[in-house]
Image (cartoon, rainbow, N blue to C red):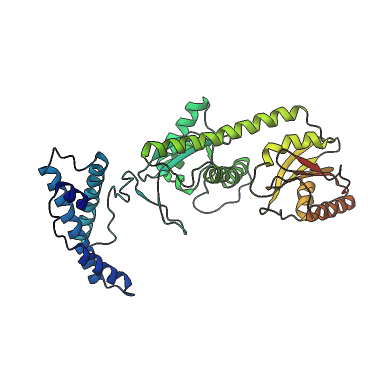
Amino acid sequence: MMCEASKELGIHRMRTKYLDVAHDNMAYVKQRHHTNKRTRRMIRRQLDLLGKILKELRRLDRENPCAGIFSDKQLAEIETITKIYRQQHKHHESGNAKESIPNRIVSVNKPYIRPIVRGKEVKKVEFGAKCNNIQVDGLSFIEKLSFNAFNEGTRLVHCVKLAEKLFGEKITKLAGDCSYSGNANRSFCSEQNIVTSFSQKGRKRENTSTVSMVKKELARVRATAMEGSFGTQKEHYGLKRISGRIKKTEILIIFFGIHTANAVQLARRIAKKTAAVKLDFSSPETIAGYYMQDLRGLDKEHLILVLLDNKCCRIRDCIISVGTVNASLVNPREIFMEALKYGASSIILLHNHPSGDETPSRNDILVTKRVAEAGEIMGIHLLDHIIIGDNKYTSLKEKEYM
């Protein structure tokens, strides 16, 4: 930038000893071991060089106001680099390498981004927007979105008030991770008679009450459905790596990513409700139509078990196993343990093929025969095994594989 400005104005570029600093920096990088003294000296030289260049750029702009040697974008970059220089210079002068820098700028092109310390094993520090969501009946809503780090544990009261405002009903049950389980939040939930998933403090006591069962179910739903939906938003709706170039664009991408996921969820529910009118557990077509939206498009094989009573009415359905891209890991024992637990007289199996091809594999046929044989011995009949593809299905009973 300084070279271009000097060339445009027809003046000699100021000597900065840039090449000397660059040469010393390369020698420093190639060294295997770095002493603190050498490191501080190298940082000092780089900061002095940067300060000298910034001073010269400001002088050129001040002495040639009508020349327009810098564009608006370049002036903004100079301003950002100046702020970074001041932050790093102050940090270096303090002599404490572990001292935190308030409002630290980590990107010249995106000066609004701040480092967010998460404490994860893989990624201890992340960069980008921090979003505090609430989830009601599987739908996510943004409670707070900020590029600055904030403690989400202090937002629980705001989350409850937002949920009550959106749906017009008092919140009676709440699930959240350990960051929300502070004493202030526990007191608030107790005052509002809200049952939470937070683990009990103090000495553990045997408790088989209804409240204890509700707490366990809340914890299970949080760990499976809620965390799973957040993962889906990251992987499939563009929230894992935001590609926006400016702050407003990034906020819009996050907003549309979350609410597109909500729209897909609502579309699946509408399709399932429509299919439920025609649902007949003696018809593979209606069964496949009912579960089609739940299974198609998943990136791993999911095996669903449908439990039926002696009148062929559904007791419940559940996911027995989640496999890999091309295989679901299942053991007949797990299937019949669930069937015996709920007193089922017959069962139906469904699983998806992420490839979209509904053709049964050799392993699908072998597993079906094993489950059918075990069911005959136990008196719990396997009525069908349906494979879901991309808006297509295959019934192993219709194909006479069982």
- Whether residue 188 is visible to the viewer of this picture, yes or no, is no
Q: Nearer the viewer, residue 233 or 338?
A: 233
Q: How many marks?
A: 0
Residue 394: name its quadrant.
Answer: top right
Q: Determine the residue positioned at 31% across, 69% down.
A: 29
The image shows residue 308 at horizontal and vertical percentages of: 81, 39
Please indicate whether residue 66 sits to the left or right of residue 290 in the image: left
Residue 143 image offset from top left, x and y in percent: 44, 35
Q: Is residue 344 left or right of residue 63?
A: right
Residue 329 shows in this picture? yes
Farthest residue to the front: give it: 10
Q: Looking at the image, which residue sits at the far left?
A: 63
Residue 36, above or below 242: below
Q: Position of residue 174 (x, y in %)?
A: 53, 38
Residue under the point 21% across and 43% down: 70
Q: Nearer the viewer, residue 10 or 364?
A: 10
What residue do we see at 27% from left, 49% from top? Answer: 102
The residue most toward the bottom is 32
Residue 128 in picture, x, y percent from top left: 40, 46
Which residue is located at x 25 percent, y 42 percent? 76
- Residue 398 is left or right of residue 22, and the answer is right
